[in-house]
Image (tube, rainbow, N blue to C red):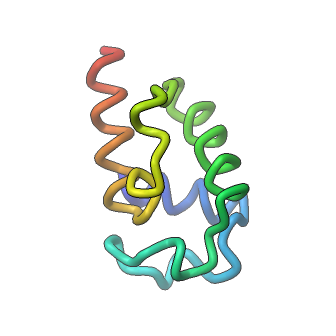
């Protein structure tokens, strides 16, 4: 899951660094992710995984690392199944 998310972020540059070099738990905001880019990321994730982030998940914490994004996507795809 994390590699799929990493690939998606690499194809849609939202962070001003090579996401391939970031560890799974690296803070994406420290790497340059902005609030606007996090919204773009959310939309790309929703399209890629055919999910919708509920308002309760629209927090800085959800999008703070590849690990936290993968956990949120896992949770949402499990609910959709």
Could you tell whether 43 is left or right of 74 in the image? right
Please state the horizontal and vertical placement of residue 69, each as a whole percent of the image: 40, 52
Q: Is residue 49 above or below residue 21?
A: above
Please state the horizontal and vertical placement of residue 77, each as a whole percent of the image: 35, 27
Please state the horizontal and vertical placement of residue 23, each as a whole percent of the image: 37, 79
Please state the horizontal and vertical placement of residue 32, each as a whole percent of the image: 63, 78
Residue drawn 39% across and 56% down?
A: 61
Q: Nearer the viewer, residue 26 or 23?
A: 26
Q: How many marks?
A: 0
Could you tell whether 54 is left or right of 43 in the image? left
Residue drawn 62% across and 54% down?
A: 38
Q: Nearer the viewer, residue 56 or 44?
A: 56
Q: Nearer the viewer, residue 77 or 64?
A: 64
Q: Nearer the viewer, residue 53 or 11?
A: 53
Residue drawn 53% across and 24% down?
A: 50
Quarter-of-image position of residue 14: bottom right
The extreme top residue here reads 81
Q: Is residue 71 above or below residue 51?
A: below
Could you tell whether 6 is left or right of 74 in the image? right
Q: Quadrant of the C terminus?
A: top left
């Amino acid at each position: 899951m994390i590699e799929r998310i990493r690939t998606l972020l690499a194809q849609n540059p939202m962070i001003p660094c090579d996401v391939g070099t970031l560890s799974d738990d690296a803070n994406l905001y420290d790497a340059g992710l902005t609030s606007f880019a996090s919204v773009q990321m959310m939309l790309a994730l929703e399209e890629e995984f055919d999910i919708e982030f509920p308002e309760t998940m629209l927090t800085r914490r959800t999008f703070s690392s590849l690990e936290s994004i993968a956990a949120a996507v896992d949770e949402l795809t499990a609910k959709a199944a």
